[in-house]
Image (cartoon, rainbow, N blue to C red):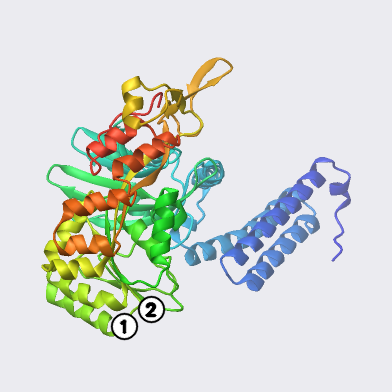
Amino acid sequence: MILLADSAILVSLFKPLLLAGLLIGWAVVAGRFDKDMDYFFLKRKLWNGVIFATGMTGMALALWIKIFWIGFPIGLLIMIGGIAAYWFYRNKEVPEKQRWQMGLSMLHQRLDERKNVSAQSKAILKLIGPEGGELEVPYGEDPFAIAHQRLQDILAFALPRQAEYLTIQISATEGKCVATIDGAKHAMEPLTSGDATQLLEYLKGSSAMNLVEKRKKQEARLKIVSPTLGSHIIDIATAGSTTGATLRLEFDKDKRLTLDFDSLGLLESQKQRLLDLLQGEQKRIVLVSVPSKQGLSTTLSSLLGQHDPYTQQLITLEDEIPVRLEGVEHTLVDPKSSIEKVSDDMARMLRSDPGVLLLSKLYDPKLAGQLGTASEDMRVYIGMRHRDTFSALKSWCKAVGDLKLAGESTTAVISQQLIRKLCVTCRVPMKPTSSALAKLNLSPDKVIYKQSGKVMVKDQEMLCPDCHGVGYRGRTGVFEVMILDDQARDFIKAGKLDLLRKHLRRQKMLWMQEAALALVVEGKTSIAEISRVMENPAKPKSKSKPKGA
């Protein structure tokens, strides 16, 4: 369509500029409206037609009416009328938060939207919700903006140090933060009670927990993504009491519970003897005794992983299933189940003639005799909670109630404790005293290592970039491996455990402390760490904060 403008308009410089500005502004608005219709699945063809028709009509009137200052406002009003009609229609169709506002409110909304986009793009920590979608990062006046910052701060402490847990005890006065790093507790800077409570509410809301429920334990899982901290899965648990609330974060649980056999920490001599047993034709029972929170589930799973699920049936009976292995029939024990129900489940499993049966614990001592009899035709792994092999063996013999059956049915007893590994970046050599060398049976020129947490950079002492001042990085197992031959089983049948101990020494079995000291000699851990763990393996005593943290 060709429009012929009045000559008075064309000879004026100001009026054509107004008309051009009107046309360009309308075109920009029409283009944005088209994208908006497409985004919200509105009636795109209809409203594009309305806006185009009102725009062309308004422009034509502005040009055709000879008196410019009458034609221009009329044309402008018609064009605005089309825009306003779409605006009114749109606000009825879209969610409330997406509606456009008029005047200064709209300006503030646009500024907020830009700030939001900027905040999301600059955020160094983002949460992925239970449904898998990325959650918006709170910013500005949002009441959870500070909570997000506090979360970022505590994760910046915990994750680089490979913490397993982070616990916040919230009272009326403060939020006490403790990180568990490689099994040892490290106190962090406390939060104010208000910040800790706000953080609790923020994580509950982000993970779709019940915000109204304050007392009962709730559990959920979130994923965090950060360019500096990496990607991590966080298991969240909350609970309340009359004195306050508890927030517990567990990091990358699945990764920590999955460990191949070669990475458990067995010494080469121990590993080879155990592999010969596991891969041999002999069946019988293997007792796996590990103190609480010292890696029982990981070790049991690793042992089970030495069997082929496609050539024999592998079945488990467990309190919880931390790791699901391919081809394995995992059975979860309901905590409310009676002993009779558990016995029935086990009897059903035994009738299916499995090649390997794994019990996370001996659910009822009365089952011990039944297992002892059945183990002639299958391999059975049983989890126990003792700190050494002889304690576990005595407990097993008592449960079976028949020394002959206990001796005949048992082929190995394994005990384990976890120790921290020295950070290889910052460990420093030390020369033990002559008495310590004699105790360790080391030559006078032998050098061993101790923890540091510091490195030298251009003659300046700085925090180690790998362990961040802790001095240790990761954990490994220390094992006591008791392999029972025919002579050993005869001693068990006769109840002569003192003779059994001497026989095992002749077979070069290493006690737990000897295996631990072997790791000291190899430079993997320190004497201080061995002393800490061997003194009390279940309750690590270190509560210090990493140096310089």
* Residue 109 position in % (x across, y down): 51, 47
- Residue drawn at x 41%, y 69% as measured from the top left: 280
Residue type at tag 1: Asp
State whether residue 146 appears in this view. Answer: no
Secondary structure under tag 2 reads: loop
Q: Secondary structure at mark 1?
A: loop
For disc 1, the marked residue is 353
What x and y, as percent, mark residue 260? 45, 57
User: Quadrant of residue 413 in the image?
Assistant: bottom left
The residue pinned by badge 2 equals 313
Residue 546: mark: none
Measuring 14% from the left and 66% from the top, which residue is drawn there? Answer: 403
Residue 323: x percent and y percent? 38, 63
Q: Is residue 521 left or right of residue 38?
A: left
What's the residue type where badge 2 is placed? Gln
Residue under the image location 39 percent in, 25 percent down: 547
| Residue closer to the observer: 240 or 450 | 450
Q: Which residue is rendered at x = 17% and y = 71% of the image?
A: 405
Crowding at mark 1 (Cα within 10 Å: few <14, some 14-19, many 20+): some
